[in-house]
Amino acid sequence: DAGVIQSPRHEVTEMGQEVTLRCKPISGHNSLFWYRQTMMRGLELLIYFNNNVPIDDSGMPEDRFSAKMPNASFSTLKIQPSEPRDSAVYFCASSPSDPSNQPQHFGDGTRLSIL
Amino acid sequence: GNSVTQMEGPVTLSEEAFLTINCTYTATGYPSLFWYVQYPGEGLQLLLKATKADDKGSNKGFEATYRKETTSFHLEKGSVQVSDSAVYFCALSRNNQGGKLIFGQGTELSVKP
């Protein structure tokens, strides 16, 4: 079975550029989560969707970050404009939301470097 | 609010040593509890879970028991291997929150031959 698929795996770009990260959740999963992981702050939940609707975006650091889920099989996380402090590994995860004791399945992440 | 606290790492052990990574939680009601493992360069993978008090989750020689009286979910393994070197995350989820997980800060384990 295909797991959560993220692209690209690595992204290096200059500050000020727009960055778009992509995620394809596992088919049939109706919850999708975006995380950011850094050495300093550990693993942070940025936003999560349930049935394509954003439920909690309180972890989104600022207006430069936006996320969309236009359909059940695709989500994007966009940073515009990007800054060096956005450098991190970004993970997408999906799960069945009901019941809530189902585990999340993580993608392999996108390693983002902003120069 | 809901929170998860893990023992700080890094934890360094010799091969075949006994492992304990402490995890305690704060939550109202009856959360489900999880341990995830992250190998270098990879995403998190579910290691084991427990959904109610006194449940024991187990996988790959790892075990953890849901202790409601002490609000704990400590991870144990009787004999670690070099291949167990990774970062371990304790997490909880509560009902009616769409599967949202609250993670601990992670504990890095390094096993030496």
Image (cartoon, coloured by chain):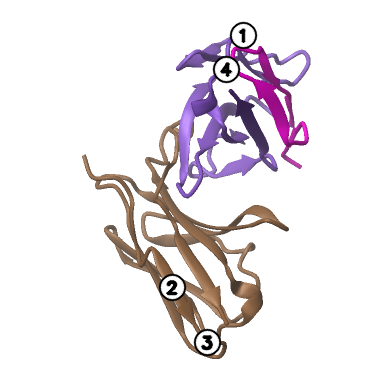
User: Which one is closest to the eye, mark 1 or mark 2?
Assistant: 2
The three-letter amino acid code for the residue at tag 2 is Glu
Range drawn in magenta = B1-25
The three-letter amino acid code for the residue at tag 4 is Val
The furthest residue to the left: A1
Check disc 1 and report the residue beneath it.
B54
State the SS at label 4. loop
Query: Which disc is residue A14 wearing?
Result: 3
Magenta stretch holds residue B19:
yes
The three-letter amino acid code for the residue at tag 1 is Asp
Q: Which chain is purple?
A: B
User: Which one is closest to the eye, mark 3 or mark 4?
Assistant: 4
The three-letter amino acid code for the residue at tag 3 is Glu
Q: CA distance from mark 1 to mark 2?
A: 45 Å
Q: Is residue B72 above or below residue A81?
A: above
Q: Are marks 2 and 4 in contact (CB under 8 Å)?
A: no
- Depth check: B56 or B40 in front? B40
Check disc 2 and report the residue beneath it.
A11
Q: Colour of chain A?
A: brown
- Residue A111 rendering spot, x and y as whole percentages: 48, 64
State the SS at label 1. loop
Q: CA distance from mark 1 to mark 4?
A: 24 Å
Q: Residues within 10 Å of mark 1 (few under 14, many from 20)?
A: some
